[in-house]
Image (cartoon, helix red, strand yellow):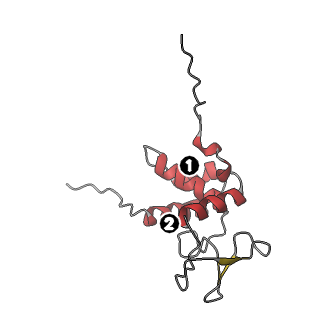
Amino acid sequence: MLYVQEKPIETDAVEHKYFENELAAIAKFESIAWPHHPVCPHCKHQGPVYDLSKTRIGLKKCRRCCKQFTVRVGTAVEASHLPLHKWLQAVYLLCASTRPVSVQQLQRTLDITYKSAWLTAKRIRNSAGYIRPIDID
């Protein structure tokens, strides 16, 4: 008789460390946005950059134009005060659900205000090209 060791099935995908920890969330977001090298959003330079993470988490400085940037610049999360791990949780909840997720459910799950949940959902839906279904009679 052959026994095969099965990998444990994750009961909840939100248990990943990048959903709970800000440093892990920044690292995950950087690996998604910049698979090879960071790209300066100001001059589009691809290549080595100065790492200013000791000053602020995730801060980089372009070697060509000398402007500072983070992975948030040029994305839907740019001007948000919400931590990046809450953004990743919101994206997961809105995209992985088979049914539409209400703003109140997002508020309760992420433990944020209704206004923040509404703005977060709006930015994610606009970025994903979500079109609200309408009734045509």
The numbered mark at residue 105 is 1
**Looking at this rendering, what residue extends furthest in the front direction?**
1
Secondary structure category for the residue under label 1: helix
Q: Is residue 68 above or below residue 99?
A: below
Look at label 2 and name its amino acid.
Arg
Note whether residue 113 is visible: no
Neighbour tally class for label 2: few under 14, some 14-19, many 20 plus, Cα within 10 Å? some
**Which x, y percent locates residue 118?**
54, 61
Q: In what quadrant of the picture does the C terminus appear?
A: bottom left
Q: Which residue is mark 2?
A: 123
The numbered mark at residue 88 is none
Left or right of 4: which side holds 126?
Answer: left
Left or right of 100: which side holds 80?
Answer: right
Note whether residue 93 is visible: yes
Residue closest to the eye, 16 or 132 = 16
Residue at the spot x=55%, y=85% of the render? 42
**Which x, y percent locates residue 119?**
54, 65
Residue closest to the eye, 66 or 129 = 66
**Which x, y percent locates residue 77?**
57, 69
Residue closest to the eye, 90 or 56 = 56
> Given this view, does label 1 or label 2 mark the residue nearer the observer?
2
**Which x, y percent locates residue 18?**
65, 53
Residue closest to the eye, 47 or 52 = 47
**Looking at this rendering, what residue extends furthest in the left direction?**
137
Q: Is residue 100 above or below residue 41?
A: above
Look at label 1 and name its amino acid.
Gln
Secondary structure category for the residue under label 2: helix
Tag 1 near tag 2, CB within 8 Å: no
Neighbour tally class for label 1: few under 14, some 14-19, many 20 plus, Cα within 10 Å? few
Q: In what quadrant of the picture does the N terminus appear?
A: top right
Q: CA distance from mark 1 to mark 2?
A: 16 Å
